[in-house]
Image: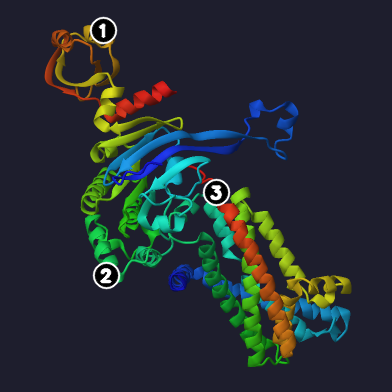
Amino acid sequence: MCIDSDKVIVVEDIFKEFKVPKDDNKLSWIKKKLKYFYREWESKTVVDNINFSIKKGDIVGYLGANGAGKSTSIKMLTGILTPTSGKIKVLNRFEPVKDREEYVKHIGVVFGQRSSLVYDIPVIDSYNLFRVMYEIDKKTFEERFNYFIKILKVEHLINVPYRKLSLGERMRFEIIAAFLHKPEIVFLDEPTIGLDASAKKIVRKFLKTINKEDNVTIIITTHDMDDIEDLCKNIIFIDKGCVLYDGSLLNFKKKYSDWRTLNINYKKIYNKENLDNLLLGFNSVTRDNQNNTIRLQVASNQDINLFLKQLLDVLEIADIEIAPPRLEDVVEGIYEKSN
Amino acid sequence: MKNKILSNFYELFKLDVKKQIEYKSAFYFDIIASILRFFVIKFLWEFIFKLVGESTIRGFMLEEMIFYVACSFACIPLLRIHAVQKVEREIQTSKINVWFTKPINYLNFIKMSSITISFFYFCINFSFFLILAYIFLPSIQISILNILMFLVMSIAIYFVILNIKSMVALIAFWTTSVWGINYFVTQIIFVFSGGLVPLTFFPDNVVTILKYLPFYYMNYSAVSILLFGSDLNFFIKSISILLIFGFIVRLLLNKFYKHAIKKLDGLGG
């Protein structure tokens, strides 16, 4: 394996398959009847020979549809799952599964739907346990902890039992737990799931700050494309267990979208029938009659001048904006094609 | 390294005690249940002795029998190893993934958690049992030495049970649920170590077999030592057998753990 000191994660040909019960339809009549006593298993490939590398200090979006293999690959990168084959080298010296106990001291992990803090007792008690686990000296612990609770605005909650916290407050404490021991890499699996807009904003601001201050590498998997647009310059897109794209977010949009988004705000419709006919030729048209807005995708090769001329004949336009494609729309397009 | 394990254990111990105290009602109801259980055992055996019309049954007088059975039940927290439910639940909810990203040995971690909870409830149950025995079983006189020997035996017994039950817990890496296996193992240990009735109730050939296994030296020997005292030789022999068996199980457990973690499939996204 070729090691580049600039790269903190190097993944070569990792492959993972699970044994799953055979589909009922593939079983013979007698085996179907006996399925409660006897099960036949088959192999299912979840991650199919993926390769990528991640540079130090990057915030990388790790994207893909449900079941694409994102979480499985994150679990292999964090040392939870053993790859069926392939090599992973992290921080130029660790093999996640083999060196797990030493390796995890250098990483932080947030599983958005699983808590690492103890449910029944005040959060500060869980952090005291983590301090001992990660062998953080008291002074450093107090400095970092106090700094983090201030940025994430949870100072007043440290003595509240975890179970009594809201989803947003819990997530902020989970994030603190992941960064407390000054890790070199942090894996965030859906860190903003279920959070309101304000909590998301606070979390994103924190991640940007800590990335800059500690030069920590962050790998983030999420279905919230606003997180990705706000935080990541680079993304890795996984589809059906394979890497579909690995590169900059900007190029991803260019590569997988051949349209622009046109946001139109109008005052009055002169001719509804003509407008309907005009919009028929476009994909993904969203009309909001209450707010007098229309959003539609215009293909890159489509003559936008001609369209605007035709539009002026049927509408009185108040405002118009030509925007680059939203990541969410690009990703949605890929999911649709893939399905 | 040892220092780190001890610090981890101390923090976990504090955390687990806090967790138990957080739910005060469970703590109080456990005390009430232990008192209630004492009286149920007392009335049941008084009735049996009256029915049989003998002053001793299988070598035990009435108050000795009540003491023996009630003490065996007070020791049940040593059998209830929290690790089993913890591992099973954490595999089912995939919370186990979180612990695998912490710099700990998961096996040691679950054992540490179990020790606190078992001893917390053992202390409560056993203290209340001693108070009730002192008040309601006046003919029973137990010395401090007997109590000390019993407590040392309890630690050795716990060492064996903890390793056996941790092995049961690890089966969850393959089967996801171990409720049935755990229940089966608990009953086997409880019955064959003389938890339900003294081993003098069992046929002689069964007792002979049990003497080649750790069962004979678990509950039956420990409670008998508390009740009747013991010569030093038998005490040392019991402790040695328990420790040897415990170490063998521990060795197997460590091997088993290495296989188990490879089976982890980290259920769900």
Label 3 environment density (alpha carbons within 10 Å; few <14, some 14–19, many ≥20): some
Marks 3 and 2 in Cβ contact (< 8 Å): no
Residue at the image position 46 percent from the left and 50 percent from the top: A79
Which callout, 1 or 2, points to the residue nearer the camera?
2
Residue at the image position 83 percent from the left and 78 percent from the top: B200
| Whether residue B190 can be seen here | yes
Q: Is A108 on the left or on the right of B227, as rendered?
A: left
* Circle 3 SS class: loop
Q: Nearer the viewer, residue B264 or A286?
A: B264
Q: Which mark is residue B264?
A: 3
* Circle 2 SS class: helix
Disc 3 to disc 1, C-alpha distance: 57 Å
* Circle 1 SS class: helix
Residue located beneath label 2 in the image: A139
Residue A195 vertical position relative to residue B159 in the rendered view, above or below: above
Q: Position of residue B233 (x, y in %)?
A: 74, 87
Marks 3 and 2 belong to one chain: no
* Amino acid type, mark 3: Leu
| Whether residue B176 can be seen here | no
Residue located beneath label 1 in the image: A277
* Amino acid type, mark 2: Lys
